Amino acid sequence: MKKLILQLSLLTLFLVLTPNAKAADYRYSQFCLRGLRDQFSLDTHYPEYADNCADGTDFRGNINDPDLFQLAGHTYVKWESPTAINWEQQPLIKYFFGLIIVLGVNPLFAQYLFAIGIAVLIYYCAKHIFHLSPFIALVPLALFALDPLFHEQLRFTYLDLGLTFFVQLYLYLFWLWTQGKKRIVSAGIVLGLAALAKSFSIGIVLGAVSLSYLFFVNKKLIKNYLLSLWQPIAIYLLGYTMFFVYHGPADFVTLHIDILKFYKSYVPEYPKGEIFRLIFTGQWRIWWDDKGLIPSPSWSLAWPLALLASFATIFQKKLRQNSFVLLHLTWIVIYLLFSSLRLVFPRYLLPILSSLYFLTALIFARAGNLLSIPHLLQLKYDRANRSNRKGE
């Protein structure tokens, strides 16, 4: 019993002291430098941010993003405003990290949950939407699970894995709605969560993807979709509940203007189209020091091959006419165009990787280009399905 009390005491001490140590690092990081705070009038707009920065103006080294997100989440769950720390990125995934820390669990547990969710979506869609055999349905899942970028996400508390889960879930639920199998409200809720996961711009991009898809597939649904957009907006506002405790509606508009100004001024000279250099060569243009090219340790030859294979679906009539394939292809194209206009980190590719590998597996399965044994298994599985349908 004494040992248990001692362990609980040490755990409580760890939870109390660790955030304070990180907060000290934060106060002396680049995020709290006086120049940045003055440029956007941060101390005036968000006093809670100034409180966390205290009087530190000396740059003594940057706090890493994974530590920053944990610190921010732990701060948010203590009923602080989402602008108290890391105001420029949306708070949802950081809330997950904070809640898990409060429970005394390693925050990486959240990453494992998101990874499981993505795996289930990939496998379920491959097996039940396209009626692939269980063996072949594992192909896109295996490609995603073996990707070095995915492994990186399991080691650090970045926001991209959670974002990827909500994006993929939204695409699935939105497609179900277009097929008359689901109400739009479920997709609307998840769209709001996707916008809250990392950047509200992703919510806008997903909205553009949805409208583009409906324009080509079913124009009659556009009006209903537009009328339903109050749902994700309501979810998005709900995610900022604690912000409205400290601020008014006008401050909420100012916050998003500040976010746009921040990213626009961050690296205004960053060249366009660097996302494609990253995909095809593995070279990543950094935005500090000499702004030169460095190799990305997470690059995989599967990236360019999967992109080319995904675009090959256009030349497969059966796949080209499939609405689910078209939706994912629309997402890939618009996301890449959006990413080509901004600063790029290798992990920014993650939200489309599962779609790329999903379409890659389909193109090989439908073209009959799999190895003989898996292909025979698929043929056997198809025959069994046809026999079952006839029996019914």
Image: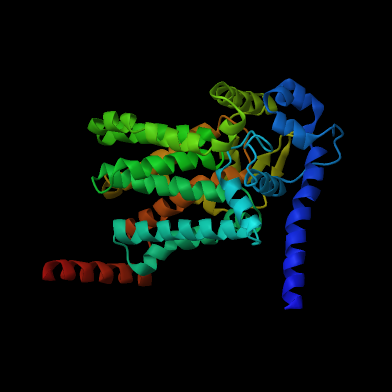
Q: Position of residue 385 (x, y in %)?
A: 22, 68
Residue 219 seen anywhere in this rendered image of the structure: yes
Query: Which corner quadrant of the image does residue 276 belong to?
Result: top right
**Whether residue 120 is situated above or below residue 234 in the rendered picture:** below
Q: Residue at x 38, y 31 (%)?
A: 230
Query: Could you tell whether 283 is left or right of 273 in the image?
Result: right
Query: Which corner quadrant of the image does residue 186 belong to?
Result: top left
**Whether residue 376 is situated above or below residue 365 in the rendered picture:** below
Residue 315 seen anywhere in this rendered image of the structure: no
The C terminus, quarter of image? bottom left
**Whether residue 338 is situated above or below residue 327 in the rendered picture:** above
The N terminus, quarter of image? bottom right
Q: Position of residue 49 (x, y in %)?
A: 71, 33
The residue most toward the bottom is: 1
In the foreground, 42 or 272: 42
In the foreground, 34 or 348: 34
Q: Position of residue 374 (x, y in %)?
A: 37, 69
In the foreground, 71 or 215: 71
Q: Residue at x 65, y 46 (%)?
A: 78
Coloring basis for residues: rainbow
Query: Could you tell whether 187 is left or right of 247 in the image?
Result: left
In the foreground, 279 or 42: 42
Q: Residue at x 86, y 40 (%)?
A: 60
